[in-house]
Image (cartoon, rainbow, N blue to C red):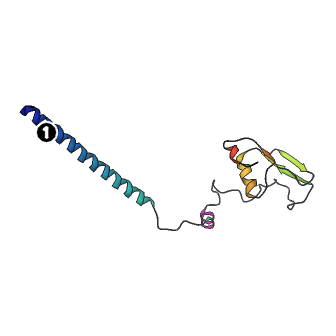
């Protein structure tokens, strides 16, 4: 090995060692930055309760569910009273007796019924429908 080759080999080794040191430094700085950023997202405060969220929501907020049936809509009868005529935006529907089976046409309706303890007799098929027990 000539002296020039030895110097070149030494320079290559130094370059590789410097690159490794810089890479470790960059990775360490990146990891510390990530830890700092994520720790800034945490909070010691307790999360607000549902009641606090509802109380703080403005009455005309688009995110609040309707609290009343619109004027002129609904039946005006107590739960379980039949026959009843229900007024809705498409007209009037008379329900002669209490429904024995309920069918839903969207997963949102299925969620609402299931949360009320009513198991729909049928529904449309949606994404993940195979996860719902028969």
Secondary structure mostly seen in magenta is: loop
Asked if the stretch drawn in magenta spans residue 42, the answer is: no
**Residue 73: x percent and y percent?**
81, 53
Determine whether the residue tagged by mark 1 lies in a helix, strand or loop: helix
- Whether residue 92 sits left or right of residue 112 in the image: it is right
Q: Which quadrant does the N terminus fall into?
A: top left
Query: 55 or 49, which is in the foreground?
Result: 49
Q: Residues within 10 Å of mark 1 (few under 14, many from 20)?
A: few
Residue at the image position 56 percent from the left and 66 percent from the top: 48
**How many numbered callouts?**
1
Say which quarter of the image contains residue 6: top left
**Residue 62: x percent and y percent?**
63, 53
Residue 124's place in the image compared with 78, above or below, is: above
Read off the magenta span: 51-69
Q: Residue furthest front?
A: 1
Which residue is under mark 1?
10
Residue at the image position 11 percent from the left and 32 percent from the top: 5
**Residue 115: x percent and y percent?**
73, 57
Q: Residue furthest left?
A: 3
- Whether residue 32 sits left or right of residue 64 in the image: it is left
Asked if the stretch drawn in magenta spans residue 64, the answer is: yes
Residue at the image position 70 percent from the left and 44 percent from the top: 130
Query: 52 or 126, which is in the foreground?
Result: 126
**Residue 127: x percent and y percent?**
66, 42
Say which quarter of the image contains residue 90: top right
């Amino acid at each position: 090995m000539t002296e020039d080759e030895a110097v070149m080999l030494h320079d290559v080794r130094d370059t590789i060692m410097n690159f490794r040191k810089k890479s470790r430094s960059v990775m360490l700085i990146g990891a510390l930055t990530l830890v700092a950023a994520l720790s800034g997202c945490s909070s010691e405060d307790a999360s607000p309760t549902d009641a606090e969220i509802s109380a703080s929501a403005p009455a005309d907020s688009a995110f609040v569910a309707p609290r009343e049936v619109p004027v002129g809509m609904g039946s005006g009868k107590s739960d379980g009273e039949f026959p009843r005529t229900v007024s809705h935006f498409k007209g009037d529907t008379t329900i002669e007796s209490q429904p024995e089976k309920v069918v839903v046409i969207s997963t949102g309706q299925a969620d609402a019924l299931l949360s009320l303890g009513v198991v729909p007799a049928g529904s449309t098929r949606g994404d993940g429908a195979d996860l719902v027990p028969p």
